[in-house]
Structure formats: structure tokens, C-alpha cells
Image: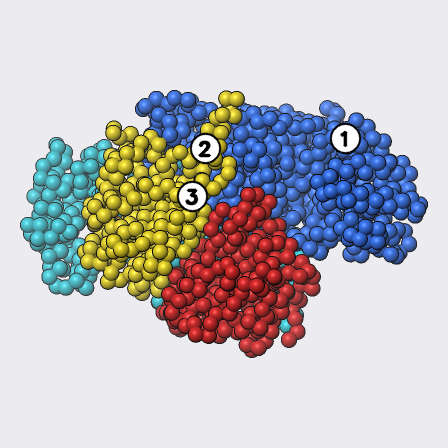
Chain colours: A cyan, B red, C blue, D yellow
């Protein structure tokens, strides 16, 4: 049993406030919540919506059609009514409307009731409760906490509005039939961005450099807010080139550092990435993808930068690329990424996207206590320390400047001590050293995860944020008599051939799977499919893509993978 | 002081203005009593940017144009280090121009020594941002038509803490300026050093500079912005050298709340051992 | 019959002058010449050398060992003596030397003879003639022309020095046995960089933007020198980002434009590349590769940027990537690259490298008459012109600003008219439009070339500048009873599967070749091998790599591919 | 003038300072008699940078921070076009800072209109290079500690041909400035326009600016660099608006030899039809 609610209106109109409030309240009530946001690249006007889906079991995806649409503008009504499900309840903030639409005049009501236009949002939230038939007290409790800082009067006014909203819905006889029963769902709501920020702070990231860019800004902003609590220097760089090089400097000096950006900003960091490869610095970059090329669709989602980030940078060096699939994984992988960067002294990229960055879900509470990663640095380096001692596995002992050793790093080809060299024998040894890290990274590459019946005839393969929608699609198809399972990669580089083949049931003989295999990607060219082919994992597969900027949903995928 | 593997083979041309700068730098570091183990030399790419390899200290020799952001990252991670940036005019003012501009404003305590030879040395003689108008090169065949970039004036306007100019051919003056730079711990410390390039700049030679440089008057008040600007805009028959400007602004490190609890490195290590 | 001569000394010592003079003289004499340069990243000192190889048949590569070494410094002697061939003649500019080395004191001689240190180079050139036993008059003729601008006296002095050099060699009884007989070789000498520059000028490139970076600077400098003659605006940009965006602007306004750079500079152009993809501009970038990562080895060669340039840029868009193999091809492909960019309105990259940029060869005279490419622009666009009309094949009619049409281009996702849009249906159509160019590019992709016996048992595959060394290796191995042939790709993206399979004798059934296949690449990871695997062309092959920064040579390869 | 598919849907917030700028721009273009078909509007990314979509002309809406190089490329390819750059303070002075700096020196005849709202509008309110000290945002939680970038002073020092400031709330003044800018064909023409952002800048509001802007005195000689600098450095209770500086330098186009034989576009077409 689940219900999808869509709050839609203009930017700056309160869609955000209303949606966020509902998410919190539902989670506190014990419902499972999954929310996504859809917005235009503008500050006022346009068409934004907040999808809040609730259920009595865990959710992993949005739904294409909603059961309850709250349209705050005529434009929202016009555009989204057609995308509401069969028999959906449609509320409109106005005084009259077509058949099948309930005109509830939230704004007018709020103005009349408490002389405030803003509190129309609370009326709307109340109406949602009315339609769903949930006890309004849950909302009232929430409003008391949420507005406690604004004074008694504001709290009271909001409560009045909420109750009135619920009444309006009941009066208009808009009650829905079945709604999910509250259960004992986890009560902590996180967005993907919050999970990333929190994980970085807990892992001991002490320096964050970024230039604002949607959809990466949310994680950056979260970290700015946490700077005092966790002790983090958060500096807005003059451009992305600076951000990457500042982070290189900070990691050289010994603190875990992080850079947040999106595709276009990442493009500007590519030279810095290559620098980190040469200097062997644990640079950590989060690229929250959005559709390109160029400026593209700044507020939309996509998985178009996979091949780019894997090859980005001139010259050859080892790297790892991760792509977490869920909010929990965003937390987990952020730490793993930082650890890998430090264990191998090499750059690591984490691919997020607008979908993951903005998705919200209630999950078990994430650790907030600082628990720094191991930087693998020498405590008392010897006097004759050299930075690039060639060792088995390629990872030399790392000392920090300011200690008993001199630490010399150079973007030119260098000798063991880090000094510039033109000796071509040393060159060869240094290339070997740097690239030999690839073997360790390869061995340790995360195995893809498997979901669904082991015996399924059709394997669906995805990476990154597509996890949730695909997982729901697997359940849907199987419930309809299908035989599907999924394989998800939360690390996309290096691809460990053995682990991948095992998960994909690929025969070594001819690189074909014993099952039908379909790749699911939010890009137009099937980049991960190419990668599997290149890695020698899988020679052939089907492909389902989406590249309009919206995330996949379980239902849509279930239709498309029949 | 034993040298820690400094590159034995110095890649500069005989007679290059970089040699006296290196000499004086070594003197000044000693005289200032700087602990070389706490010294980090940050550079980009170019002839000047090779200096860190020829002396003793920690070295971050990064990308062309990107010495400043790396240096800022280092200083913000561990502001107890003495971070010296050594760069060329192309490196700092050309490719690195945006970082120069905004780090003047950011005012992190870096010692920024720019070997200004008014040419791209390492890439064989193209015009740099500070090349004089009319300067002929293999690319600028009819001579430079861009107005030379004025780093001192930019620094004065945009908030640098300390702005000075010296000359590779005036060792005593240069040492004095370096010592003054080392002493300034309240933000961005720019020392632009006129540096003859004997291979590619046949115009701005030792002779040319020697005939023109003039120490600023003792009466000059570096806190007087208008007077400083006037000096900074002078270029031609007279080229003022000396401390041109001091802003009196507080350094970034002293204003960023989070750094008041110790360096970020200490804060990390405290957390790790808690 | 061929002879390899190596002139070696410090930077700034005259290696360059002497080498260049010899190349010219030999070519005029009717010998086939192939020259390469090896130098450190510094202006004075270090160790530079100029390899001049001469023969009575066409040459394609250098040789690892020389037959005649001219060492101008003790360091050059020490380092390079061991790399001279068995029985090589070794000349040293000094007054005494070890056994087996002839001390000829060029500098002292020049100083005594004409009171000039510089003319030691001419003494050395004369000595080379003496050793080889060629008539000194050829050199004298050349000196007369070369120094005619410097006055009678200088000419005379040089001639005196040349004659004395030859005498010194004869007096020391240093004559070599057999030397190649002059034949009717082509007399025009070009470097790869000159060929690129000339081709661009002839093709009608009217705007060149670059930031100096070895080894791309030579082409940029050549174009600066040709600016007045051909009418080209050549502007040194403040950085590579500017260069790429300036070129985008210039192409938008209607003139063919070009950007020259090397890997690190290319890294900074990546966002601009994505812009050109989105705006559908015929941006043309030459990336003359050098070893990385980061600053790497600025004056050395390598093929490490292949995968990078193919995927560079966030988002997805079509592109072509070329990699000419010889000086002639550098000329030919530069034009093809510009034409492709204009025919498909999409960015095109040409991969060169230090080896190709600096290699010199005498070939038939290249066309110097301006012969502009077709830009495929509308002469009189209609009033209601829109820039991005969706058409079969994806290439909309192109108008220029300032004409009867308004030309609107936007880095955001845009509608047909070029205006920013948030309409996701249009988004999908625009992605399809942009990517559909890929089909045309695929069909037109240059077929790889084949050299050697059709029936050869061992196929050697290479791309870009490795052509020459590999071609010589094929001849050498076959002359030793081997059975090898080579396949060379001068276009590396897109890879046309059918054309590639045909050349590589690959069976569709299992993507295996009916021959043994070995890839030859100047990188450590076998990037082109990965690409062929990804493209689905070839599933398995051997790999021979070199990544010390020096170019392959035919002899070395012949040893390694047995 | 019929409009050529200008975007009907203007993405600015009601009350935004960009609206009067757009209005006045349209007026000024008409009044200056500029042929819209020869007009090229070049912008980067940001709220201001959307302006080209809301009027009529050729449009090159490029990358964030990269309007200037694109505009230079266009102008060098066809210098008969009227090339207007419309940009925000983040776009032009932040991400695009290096291009700003060096194009002042290059002095190509571009009309550069910067909508300076002292904030990053499109990305929701982070500090921009021109944000005042103490300005609090979601990233700069304790307020900006960098010194605000002074674009006028930089432009005066580094060689711009024409440097002016106006204000979105002073329509007549703004039009006058735009007309003067359109008239200046001897190089880089900077018009910095104070533009209230009603959504994210609650400090520098219409009221705040209106109380402070003061037209420069008629007696001011824009050719007097020192006087111009003094005006440019004024910021606070009084903010001078007007034509601050004129350098009298010749434009790049008139100094680059190859452009004397016609535009590059003409030269290409001549060669193609020869
Ligand atoms: C991204 C990038 N672009 C270009 C280069 C090539 N390059 C190296 S040094 C240099 C200019 C050096 O000039 P300057 O900084 O003045 O130093 P100098 O050699 O004169 O001391 C250039 C263009 C590079 N290494 N990286
Ligand atoms: C390379 C890159 N980095 C970041 C962004 C995100 N971005 C878009 S507009 C903008 C700032 C806009 O500020 P400003 O130029 O002042 O324009 P305003 O919106 O205030 O008019 C940023 C950071 C981007 N599009 N591209
Ligand atoms: S090229 Fe110029 S700057 Fe570089 S080392 Fe030689 S003289 Fe010095
Ligand atoms: S965010 Fe500010 S600058 Fe942008 S449109 Fe709104 S008011 Fe104008
Ligand atoms: Mg220089
Ligand atoms: Mg702004």
C-alpha cells in the first residue's frame, strides 16, 4: 500500500516548505517516506514539484503518476494533471476549477484566517492530511516544534491553518479510500546530499573547497553549516580550478579534503586531477551529475559523465570511481572513497547526481560522532625520507611537511625524492610505480550487489542512483510473474572482471551471460555497457536508457524491461 | 644546514637573473631564522618555478598557474607552516591570473615571490602579461599590443597586505625586501622581483633595469594607498623598488573562526586520537 | 644503405643549428632524410641531440644507435657513446679523448680560424661531410644561401670553417666505408608542425588561439609567422580556457579556427569542448601529446591522451578524433579534420605528439596556395531561420550572425531556435539530434591503412605517429624471414567496426582475428587495445608499449615483435 | 522591430533589478540605431546572462565565466559586428576573472555590461566577488571576510578604454551610460550596473543603492587616471555613478595589422571565391 503525493507550483511559492514538512511529519508518524524534487533552473516562477511517497514498507523510488496532486498554480495544474494517476485526487489553490479538480483556495483561506499568504502552505499540508484521513494531530505536533522558535502566535496561526485545511478537504468529501497504516519506520530523514556531507564530516574531512554548482551545492552548503561543529575549513573558491588545486594543497599538508562539483565544474578540475595522480595525493571529488553537454539542464539528473570521469586527465594514473545507489550508500561510500584515496594515495571520484543528491528517505540514524579515517601517514619519518620510494604495490610511505622529513612533490616527472628529473629510466620506474596501484585497487574493487531471485532469467544491471527505481522494478515484474533480478555497481572503476562476471553469470569462454542481460542507464549511449565490454566482462547486452533529465521510476522501468 | 637532495643540476642559463634571487633567498631564509622543515616552497611551472628544487625545504611544485590555490590549501590545512610561493610572471599573472586576483582579496598569509622577467622563459620567449608594448617575439611578430599587466597596482587595489618590488641585480635591496616579506604575517605578501632573462629578453636586461630602478623614498608611507598607487603606476625611465604598500588588513587565518582552534591538521589529529 | 648521424650537446649550443643545416643540405643533395630531436625541458645546458638519418630510399623512423656521433660536450659523449652503433665514428669537440673517439676541437678551430665560437657548428658540419666523404661543395652551396643575408664576410668565414672541418676529418682518417648515394629524393623538408600549420593556413583557418605549450608551440609559432601571408589572426590567449572559448566564438562568427595545445592545456579546454558539442560548433583542437600525468616530461613524446580526448567533456556529444602518422598525413589530416568539423558542426580533435611535431622529412612539395574548405553555411538564410532545426542526420543548416538571420546558440539545453528551454520533450529530441551525427561520422570514419603482405601471419596494429617506426619494423622483420604486416589507424574515433574488422581480419563470430595481432602503443596501458575491445572489434591481442618518452624506432620494434 | 523568438517566459523574479536593465537596454539599442542583425549578445551563465534570450539579436550564450573569450573570438572573426557582453558579477569577475583581467589589457572593442548584484543569484545566494564584507550567506555563514573586488579600479589600471558605473534604479542615467558605451569604439568598454537582487541580497537593496549612488561631478575629467581611481575606490555612503574613466588607447582591432585588410570573415570569403 503506498500513496504518491505531488506538491507543485512556482519556484519560491512554498513547494519546498510544504514538501519538506510533509516528509518530516510522515516519517515521525511511522510511515516509510521517499521524496524527490523536480525544479527548473530559476528562483521564481516556472514549475517545481515535490514528490512525497509514503508506504507501510520501505520505498526506493518515486512514481511517475501521483495519487494526490496539490497544484498551487494554474500552470502546475495544466502541466501535471495529465500525469496524475487514474482516480487521483487533485487539489487546486483557487476558487474554481474544472470537473474532477477540487478548488480549495489555500491562499485565500490563509489570508482570511491569519492574514498571511505564506501560511497557505500550512493550509495545503492540512488538506493533504484531510484527504488522506490521517489524524491532524501529527501535523499539529510537528508545527509546534518546527515553529517554536518563531513565537507562540506563529505556532497558533499555523495550527489554525492546518486544521482548517483538513476540514476543507473533509467538507469537500475528498477522502481517499485506503491509505498506508503507520508502522515502525525509521524516523531520521536524510537527503543524499546530507548523507554525503555528514559522512565526510565524520570521516574527518577538514577542508572543503568548491565553487557553487547545482546539484552539488547542497552537499557543500551542508558542510558549511557543519563547519563549526566538526571543525572544517569551508572555502568558496574563485573557480573550480582553484578548488581542485586547493584540495591538492590541503591533502599534501595532511588533512583529508574534499571537492564538490557538477560536470561542468569537474571539466575544469581535470588538470588538477592529473596533478593528484602525479603527486599521488588522496584527492576526493564528488561530481553530482546533471544532463549536459555544457550547461545543459542544471537542475535535472543524468548519468552522462561516467566515461568522462574514468578517463579524465592527461597521462596515465590509477584512480577509483564510486557511484552510490541510495542515501545509506551515499553515507557509506563517501567514507570508503576517502579511505581508498588515502590507502592508495591517488584521486578518487564519487559520482552522484541530482536524483541522489535531492532524494530524501527515512532510514536508521546515521553516525554523527567524528571517527576519522586512517590517513596512513608516517608518525616519525626518518631523516633520509624520500616521498616516492618505489615499493611493491606502488604506495610509498607518506610523510607530512612540517615533520622531521622534507616532503618534496613535483608535477614534473620526478625521482624518488620528488625532484624533477629527465632521467628516462627513472621515468619508466615511476610510471610502473604509479600504475601498479591499479592492481590493489582492482583486487579491492567493491563487488556488485545482487537483488532478486538467484535463478532469475533476466538480469538487469545498473550503477549509481538507478538502484532504487530498478529494485522496485524487479519487485514489480516478479510480482507480475516475471523472472528478473538486478546487479548494482556502486563502484564503476576499476571493474573487477571476476567479481563482475560472477554477479552477471558470465561465462569466461565467450564473455556471454547465461541469462538475458539488460543495462539500465540514465544516458543515451550506454556508457556502462561500453565499459563492461571494454573491461572484457560482457560482450553483449540489451540497453534501456533515459536522458530527459528526470529520474527513472520503478513503475516505468517495469513497463520497459518486460 | 644540510641540503635535502636538492637537484644538483640547476637548469637555468648561465647569467640568468634567477641565480642571484636563489642566493639571496637562501641568505634571507637563514637570516630570518626560518626552520627549513617548516618551510614549504610552492611553485607552478616555469624557470622561476624550479627554484624550490635548488634549495632545501618542503616542496610542492604543482601545475603551471596554480601555485597559489595549492599554497592556500596548504596554509589553510596547516597555518603554522611558512608557505612561500615562487613563481614567474606568466605563471602568476597569466595562467594564474584569476587566483592572483582573488587571493589578493582572500589575504591568506603567503609569501609570494614573483620572478618577473617580462617573458615566458621556459617556453622560449613568448610575451608574458608584463611584457612591454612593442616587445617582439616568435608569436608577437609585430610586437606586443596589449598593455602590460600592473601587478603592484592590482595588489594595492584588491587588498593585499604587503606589496613590494625588488630587482635581481640589487642583492642587498632584495634581501631587505625578502626579510620584510618574511616578517609580514598579516596576509598576502607580494614581492615582485625584476629578473633579467638573458636568453629571451634582450630588451629588459640587467643594464636596462639597473639604469631605471630607484628605491622608494624613505618618506614614502606604505599605508598611504594613493601614494602607493602612484608609485605602482610608475614604469619607464624610473622604476620604483621597495615596499610600496601595506594595507593593515588582518590575515584570513586570523579571521576564519575555525582556525582559531588550532590548525586543521591539529584538529584532525586531536579527533583521531580522541 | 643508410647512415644515422647524431649531433649532441647542451641546449643553446648549436645542436639545433647544425642539425637543421645538415637536414637541408642532405635533402638538396638528393638523399632521403629523416630527422628527430631529443631535448630536455631547459634553455641552456642539459643534453639535446638531433638525429639525422640519410639513405638512398625513403625513411620513416629514427634509429636507436647512430653510426656517427658528434658530441659537443663531455656529458654528451659520456651519455651517448654507449648508444652508438658498433664501429660508429665518434667525434668530440675537444682536444683529447679516449681511444675510439676522435677529438676534433671544433670550437678551438673556429675561434682560431675566424675568431668566432658560434661557427664551431659549421666546423662540425664540415667534419660530418669529411667523415661521410661527400663533396663539401654541397655544404658550401648551402652556406652561401643560408648566410647570404648576413653579408659576404660571414659567408666566407662559414665556408672556411666548413672546409676546415672536412679536412680535419680526412686528416684524422675518419672516413666511413659505404655511405648512401644521392638519388632523386624530394627536396622539400617539413616538420610535422610545419605540415600542420601549412595545411591549416591553406584550408582557410583564419583565427588561431593558443597558450604556449611544448610540443604544440611549434605549430602555433609557424602560424604566427604565416599570419601576414595567409591573413590569419593569431592571438596568444591568457590561458587555455580562453583559447578554446575564443575559438568557439570565432567559429560561431563564421571563420574556421584552430587551437593548438598539449595534454595539460587540453585538460583546461574540456569544458569548452563540451560547449562546442552543445552549440554544434566546428571547433578544431590539435593536442600534441607529451608524457604525463600533470607536467610530466614536457619535451618528450607519448600517446597517453587517447582515451582522455575521446571521452573528454561532460555530457554526451559526437566528435571525431584523428591521429596522423607521418608528415604528409599531418598535412592531409589537418584538412580532413577541419572539413569534418564543418560538415558535422561538431568538435574535432587531432592527436599529434612531440615525435610527429618535431620529426623532419623531405617529401614532395606540399600545396601552399590557399584553398579554403567548404564551411557549409547558408548564403541567404530565410527570415524565419532557426539554428537547430531537427533534420535527418542531425546537421542543421548553418547561418552566420550578421546575415539576414538571427543566429542564437545556447549552452543550456535549447529549443530549435536556440533559446534556453526546460521542456524535456525538446531535450530528448535535441539529444537525439546531436548524437545522430555519430552515424555519419561512423560511416565516414577513415579506414585503417594496411602495409605489408596480405598473407602475413602476424598483424601489427598502431595509430598516430607510430606509423613510421612500425613500417620499418615490418620491413625489417620480413627481410629476416618473418611474416608481418601492419594496420595503421589515422582516425581513432569513431572506430568503424566493419572497416576495422576487415583490416584486422577479424571474424564477426567471436571477435577474434584469423592472425596473431599485436598492438603497438606509446603508452603503458594499451589504450587503443581497450578501445578496440570496447568497440567490439577485437577481443584479444598482444601489446607492445613504450612510455619512457622517446619515440619507437624501427629496429627496436623489430626486436620486440618477434 | 519584430522580435525573433525571444523567450516568452522570463525567468527573473518579480521586482528583480534585471527588468529595468533589459528595458533600458532595448531603448538604448533603438536610440543608438543599432541594427539588431549585426548585434551579437554574448553571455555566460547566471541570471544576468539570460538577458540575451529576452531581447532580439544574435545570441551566443556560452559557459559560466567564459563570455569574454567567446566575445573576443567573435569580434576578431568579424569586427564589423556590434558585440555586447551581458554578464553577472560572478560570471565576469569570479569564474571569468582571468579573462576580465587580460581583456582589459587586450582592449578589443566589446561593450561589457555587468549586472552587479553582489551575489550569486542563479545558484541561490552565495557570496560573489563583489559581496560586501560581512555579507552572510548559506556558505559564508559568519559573513564574507574577503575584500570586495573592485572592477572599476582594476579596469582603470589595466587599460580598459572606457569605464563607467550605473544603477538599475536610475533608468535615465543607465540609458545615458549605455548610449555612451555604444558610442565608444576604441576598445574594452566596461559598464558595471548596480542591480538589486530581491531574492538573495537583502542588504544591497533598491533602497540601499538609491540612498548612495551619486552621479560624478560634471567637472570630472575621465581622462585623468588619478581622479578616476579615486572615484573608483569610493564605496560606502557615497557610490559614484557615471563615466569614471577613458584611456584614449587605440582598440586592438585598429592595431592588429591583419585586421586592416577587412574582417577575417571577409578575408575568408574572398579567398573562398577567388
Ligand atoms: C597548462 C599549461 N599550459 C602551458 C604550459 C607551458 N608552460 C610552461 S612554463 C610556461 C611559461 C613560463 O613563463 P613564466 O611563468 O613567466 O616563467 P619563466 O620561465 O619566465 O620563469 C608555459 C606557458 C604548462 N606547463 N601548462
Ligand atoms: C563551470 C560552472 N561553475 C558553476 C556554475 C554554476 N553557476 C551558474 S550561474 C552561477 C553564479 C551566478 O552568479 P552571477 O554571475 O553573479 O549571476 P547572477 O545570477 O547573480 O545574475 C554559478 C556559480 C556553472 N554553470 N558552471
Ligand atoms: S630562459 Fe631566461 S629566465 Fe629561463 S633560465 Fe634562461 S635566462 Fe633565466
Ligand atoms: S535571484 Fe536575484 S538576480 Fe536572480 S532573478 Fe531573482 S532577484 Fe533577480
Ligand atoms: Mg617569465
Ligand atoms: Mg550576481
Q: Looking at this view, name the residue that lies furthest to the left.
A: A112
Identify the secondary structure beneath mark 2: loop
Depth check, front residue: D130 or C392: D130
Depth-wise, is mark 2 or mark 1 nearer the camera? 2
Dot 3: chain letter = D
- Crowding near pointer 2: few (<14 within 10 Å), some, many (20+)? many
Q: Position of residue A304 (x, y in %)?
A: 44, 40
Query: Residue at left 51%, top 42%?
Result: C235
Q: For mark 2, what is the residue?
A: D263
- Disc on res. C58: 1
Tell me, yes or no, if residue B117 can be seen here: yes
Query: Residue at left 48%, top 53%?
Result: B148
Identify the secondary structure beneath mark 3: loop
Identify the secondary structure beneath mark 1: loop
Q: For mark 3, what is the residue?
A: D251
Give the quarter of the image for residue A294: top left
Amino acid at each position: 500500500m503506498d500513496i504518491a503525493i505531488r506538491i507543485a507550483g512556482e519556484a519560491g511559492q512554498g513547494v519546498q516548505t510544504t514538501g519538506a514538512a510533509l516528509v518530516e511529519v510522515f516519517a515521525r508518524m511511522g510511515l516509510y517516506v521517499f521524496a524527490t524534487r523536480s525544479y527548473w533552473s530559476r528562483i521564481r516562477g516556472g514549475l517545481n514539484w515535490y514528490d512525497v511517497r509514503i508506504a507501510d514498507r520501505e520505498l526506493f523510488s518515486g512514481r511517475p503518476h501521483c495519487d494526490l496532486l496539490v497544484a498551487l498554480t494554474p500552470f502546475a495544474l495544466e502541466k501535471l494533471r495529465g500525469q496524475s494517476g487514474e482516480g487521483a485526487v487533485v487539489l487546486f489553490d483557487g476558487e474554481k476549477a474544472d470537473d474532477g479538480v477540487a478548488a480549495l483556495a489555500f491562499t485565500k483561506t490563509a489570508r482570511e484566517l491569519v492574514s498571511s499568504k505564506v501560511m497557505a502552505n500550512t493550509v495545503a499540508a492540512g488538506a493533504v492530511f484531510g484527504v488522506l484521513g490521517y489524524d491532524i494531530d501529527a501535523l499539529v505536533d510537528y508545527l509546534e516544534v518546527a515553529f517554536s522558535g518563531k513565537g507562540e502566535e506563529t505556532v497558533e496561526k499555523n495550527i489554525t491553518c492546518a486544521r482548517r485545511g483538513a476540514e476543507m478537504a473533509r467538507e469537500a468529501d475528498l477522502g481517499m479510500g485506503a491509505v498506508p497504516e503507520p508502522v515502525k519506520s525509521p524516523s531520521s530523514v536524510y537527503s543524499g546530499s546530507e548523507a554525503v556531507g555528514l559522512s565526510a564530516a565524520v570521516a574527518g574531512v577538514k577542508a572543503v573547497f568548491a565553487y557553487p554548482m547545482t546539484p552539488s551545492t547542497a552537499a557543500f552548503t551542508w558542510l558549511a553549516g557543519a563547519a563549526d561543529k566538526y571543525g572544517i575549513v569551508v572555502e568558496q573558491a574563485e573557480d573550480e580550478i582553484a578548488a581542485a588545486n586547493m584540495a591538492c594543497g590541503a591533502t599534501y599538508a595532511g588533512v583529508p579534503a574534499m571537492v564538490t562539483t557538477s560536470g561542468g565544474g569537474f571539466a575544469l578540475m581535470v588538470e588538477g586531477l592529473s596533478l593528484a595522480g602525479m603527486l599521488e595525493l588522496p584527492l576526493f571529488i564528488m561530481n553530482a551529475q546533471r544532463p549536459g553537454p555544457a550547461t545543459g539542464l542544471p537542475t535535472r539528473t543524468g548519468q552522462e559523465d561516467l566515461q568522462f570521469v574514468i578517463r579524465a586527465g592527461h597521462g596515465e594514473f590509477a584512480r577509483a570511481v564510486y557511484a552510490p545507489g541510495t542515501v545509506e550508500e551515499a553515507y557509506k561510500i563517501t567514507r570508503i572513497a576517502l579511505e581508498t584515496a588515502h590507502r592508495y594515495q591517488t584521486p578518487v571520484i564519487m559520482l552522484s547526481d541530482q536524483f541522489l543528491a535531492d532524494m530524501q528517505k527515512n532510514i536508521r540514524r546515521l553516525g554523527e560522532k567524528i571517527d576519522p579515517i586512517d590517513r596512513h601517514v608516517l608518525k616519525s619519518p626518518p631523516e633520509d625520507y624520500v616521498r616516492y620510494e618505489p615499493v611493491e604495490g606502488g604506495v610509498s610511505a607518506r610523510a607530512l611537511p612540517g615533520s622531521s622529513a622534507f616532503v618534496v612533490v613535483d608535477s614534473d616527472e620526478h625521482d624518488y625524492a620528488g625532484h624533477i628529473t629527465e632521467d628516462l629510466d627513472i621515468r619508466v620506474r615511476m610510471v610502473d610505480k604509479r600504475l601498479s596501484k591499479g592492481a590493489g585497487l582492482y583486487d579491492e574493487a567493491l563487488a556488485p550487489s545482487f537483488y532478486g531471485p538467484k535463478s532469475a532469467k533476466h538480469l538487469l544491471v545498473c550503477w549509481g542512483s538507478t538502484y532504487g527505481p530498478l529494485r522496485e522494478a524487479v519487485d514489480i515484474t516478479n510480482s507480475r510473474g516475471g523472472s528478473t533480478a538486478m546487479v548494482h555497481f556502486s563502484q564503476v572503476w576499476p571493474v573487477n572482471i571476476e567479481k563482475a562476471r560472477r554477479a552477471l553469470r558470465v561465462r569466461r569462454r565467450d564473455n556471454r551471460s547465461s541469462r538475458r542481460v539488460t543495462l539500465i542507464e540514465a544516458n543515451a549511449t550506454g556508457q556502462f555497457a561500453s565499459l563492461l565490454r571494454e573491461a572484457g566482462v560482457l560482450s553483449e547486452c540489451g540497453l534501456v536508457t533515459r536522458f530527459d533529465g528526470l529520474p527513472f521510476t520503478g513503475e516505468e522501468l517495469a513497463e520497459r524491461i518486460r | 644546514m644540510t641540503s635535502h637532495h636538492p637537484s644538483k643540476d640547476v637548469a637555468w642559463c648561465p647569467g640568468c637573473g634567477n641565480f642571484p634571487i636563489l642566493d639571496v633567498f637562501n641568505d634571507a631564509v637563514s637570516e630570518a631564522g626560518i626552520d627549513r622543515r617548516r618551510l614549504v616552497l610552492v611553485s607552478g611551472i616555469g624557470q622561476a618555478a624550479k627554484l624550490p628544487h635548488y634549495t632545501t625545504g618542503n616542496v610542492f611544485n604543482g601545475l603551471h598557474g596554480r601555485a597559489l590555490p595549492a599554497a592556500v590549501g596548504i596554509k589553510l590545512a596547516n597555518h603554522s607552516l611558512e608557505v612561500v610561493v615562487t613563481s614567474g610572471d606568466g605563471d602568476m599573472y597569466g595562467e594564474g591570473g584569476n587566483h592572483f586576483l582573488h587571493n589578493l582579496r582572500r589575504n591568506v598569509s603567503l609569501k609570494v615571490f614573483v620572478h618577473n622577467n617580462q617573458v615566458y622563459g621556459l617556453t622560449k620567449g613568448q610575451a608574458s602579461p608584463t611584457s612591454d608594448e612593442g616587445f617582439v617575439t616568435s608569436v608577437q611578430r609585430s610586437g606586443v599590443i596589449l598593455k602590460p599587466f600592473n601587478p603592484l597596482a592590482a595588489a594595492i587595489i584588491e587588498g593585499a597586505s604587503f606589496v613590494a618590488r625588488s630587482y635581481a641585480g640589487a642583492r642587498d635591496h632584495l634581501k631587505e625586501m625578502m626579510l620584510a616579506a618574511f616578517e609580514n604575517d598579516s596576509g598576502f605578501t607580494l614581492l615582485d622581483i625584476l629578473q633579467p632573462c638573458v636568453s629571451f629578453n634582450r630588451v629588459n636586461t640587467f643594464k636596462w633595469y639597473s639604469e631605471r630602478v630607484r628605491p622608494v623614498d624613505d618618506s614614502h608611507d606604505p599605508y598611504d594607498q594613493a601614494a602607493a598607487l602612484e608609485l605602482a603606476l610608475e614604469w619607464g625611465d624610473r622604476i620604483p623598488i621597495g615596499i610600496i604598500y601595506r594595507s593593515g588588513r588582518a590575515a584570513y587565518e586570523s579571521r576564519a573562526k575555525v582556525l582559531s582552534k588550532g590548525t586543521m591538521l591539529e584538529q584532525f589529529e586531536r579527533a583521531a586520537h580522541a
